[in-house]
Image (cartoon, rainbow, N blue to C red):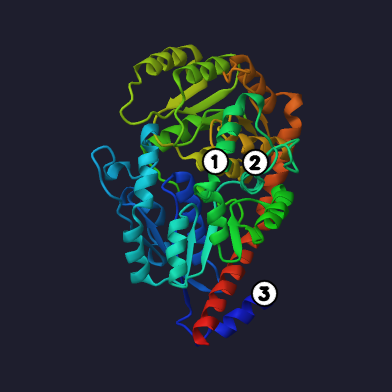
Amino acid sequence: METSINYFKSHLEGQTNGTIRVLMLSWLAHGHIFPFLELAKRLVNTNNFNFIVYFCSTPIILNSIKKKLKGGKFSSLIKFVELHLQESSDLPPSHHTTNGLPPNLMGKLKKAFKSSLPNFTNILEDLKPDLFLYDSAEWAANVAREYHIPSINFITTSTTMTCFLFHAFKNLKGNICDDFPFIETIHFRSYEKHRLDNLIARVENQHVQKESTIECIEKSSGIVLIKGIKDNESKYCDYLSKLCGKKIILVGPLVQEPADEDDDENSDEIISWLNKKSEKSTILISFGSEYFLSNEETEAIGHGLELTNVNFIWVVRFPKGKDISIVENFLQGFLARVGDRGLVVDYWAPQARILKHPSIGGFLSHCGWSSVMESMKYGIPLITLPMQIDQPINSRLVEEVGIGIEVVRSDDRKIDKEKVARVINKVVNEEGGRFVREKIKNVSDKIALKGNDEMNVVVEELVKLYYQKKKKINK
């Protein structure tokens, strides 16, 4: 590959100032923003080419990640570009992010994001980037195409989920899921029928409006970048490539280093608490920034924890403006019962630092893709409790790879406290979970050995697109 990179570099020298200018725009959720930011950092850190990244998002999001670029080359080579959305009384600028957004406003945020097209067009005209990376904004890719700018779809969920969706949307005849080639392991459970029904409705609606997942991939210029590790999803990469006719490139886990996370008094308190616990004796519990547990779910998980003997850090989140008195009362009594065995925090927690800590022996997670990647990198086995969107399919993949065990719900979708306790004990302590603990360590070791291999491939493919664009311009 070094020969290929040198070839492109020699041909590009003299044609430009040696800098490749990349514009990035992702959906307004931390699970999308942070993978884009990590990709940006790796691009500008490459040794063979000079990249400058223009990172476009709303002011509220940009302000929340500024500290992650303080000092060094990142602050000069990754430039923030503000995208202003239309304001309304129930969607002020402070709500131009999914973080803490009340669920009933999600539709309005999506509409406001798409309505920012004129502002984005102005940004594109002003910057005139060489390449454009996007995830769900097919409308932005359309504009980039009008300006002859290669657009690359960067997907921040699993290849497996993307493959499952693309198969469904491309197979309008017959049963959209039963004929999926990997249905034995990758499927919705019986109590997730409502998710399957929603998927079928989206498929059937394609005669009215083309599905965004399909359109975003189809707009991509020859390649599709996906966050993930090919060793774990190789067959899904191959099948997705066959379905969409594009080269699928996995960019690696893109996990931020613990040193890049924000340090504050709260973070120090958590690490200090962990320092008092023995090795592999503690689990982290977190369900991400977009899902808020119901009172019933909170109580079931809490009672399940009481039935175990493991220590735990539980990150709880509440939507803005919600009455949380009932769950607060439960948590107060719960903490009194578990004593120093548990720590409950209702603020941002440094997840990577926590997972890297030697006292952590498991991760009770919703199976958001970024959380799965962090578990893989730091070798922490998963106790999965998927909640929404791609999480059920991610959880099935986790079990297929052998790095976690799912807490299967009852037929009425309820969480069983005894199942919670049983899976936690198995994954963290019992002989029956040894295979999971050994497999996740093996996966983590492989990630460390690979180093920058995936990013080298990404850089080569982006440079190819850049060079192809220059050839067309110079004809």
Name the residue carrying label 2.
379
The answer to whether 68 is drawn above or below residue 183 in the figure is below
Q: Viewer-proximal residue, 268 or 466? A: 466
Lower position in the chain sequence, tag 1 or tag 2: 1
In contact (CB < 8 Å): disc 3 and disc 1:
no
The amino acid type found where label 2 is placed reads Gly
The amino acid type found where label 3 is placed reads Glu
The answer to whether 359 is drawn above or below residue 19 in the figure is above
Residue found at the far left of this picture? 89
Image point (41%, 36%), residue name: 348
Image point (43%, 59%), residue name: 140
Name the residue carrying label 1.
202
Lower position in the chain sequence, tag 3 or tag 1: 3
Q: Viewer-proximal residue, 29 or 50? A: 29
Between the residue at mark 3 and the residue at mark 1, the CA separation in whole angstroms equals 44 Å
Name the residue carrying label 3.
2
Q: Is residue 469 visible?
A: yes
The amino acid type found where label 1 is placed reads Arg
Q: Is residue 89 left or right of residue 218?
A: left
In contact (CB < 8 Å): disc 1 and disc 2:
no
Image coordinates for residue 190, horizontal then vertical, percent:
66, 25
Image coordinates for residue 434, horizontal then vertical, percent:
75, 30
Query: Could you classify mark 3 by the number of other residues whose Cα lies within 10 Å: few (under 14), some (14-19), or many (20 or more)?
Result: few
Between the residue at mark 1 and the residue at mark 2, the CA separation in whole angstroms equals 37 Å
Query: Could you classify mark 2 by the number of other residues whose Cα lies within 10 Å: few (under 14), some (14-19), or many (20 or more)?
Result: many
Would you identify the image quadrant in which residue 462 lies? bottom right
Secondary structure category for the residue under label 3: helix
Image coordinates for residue 319, horizontal then vertical, percent:
37, 30
Q: Which mark is residue 331?
A: none
The answer to whether 342 is drawn above or below residue 186 in the figure is above
- Image quarter hosting the N terminus: bottom right
Q: Select label 1 or label 2 by which is in front.
A: 1
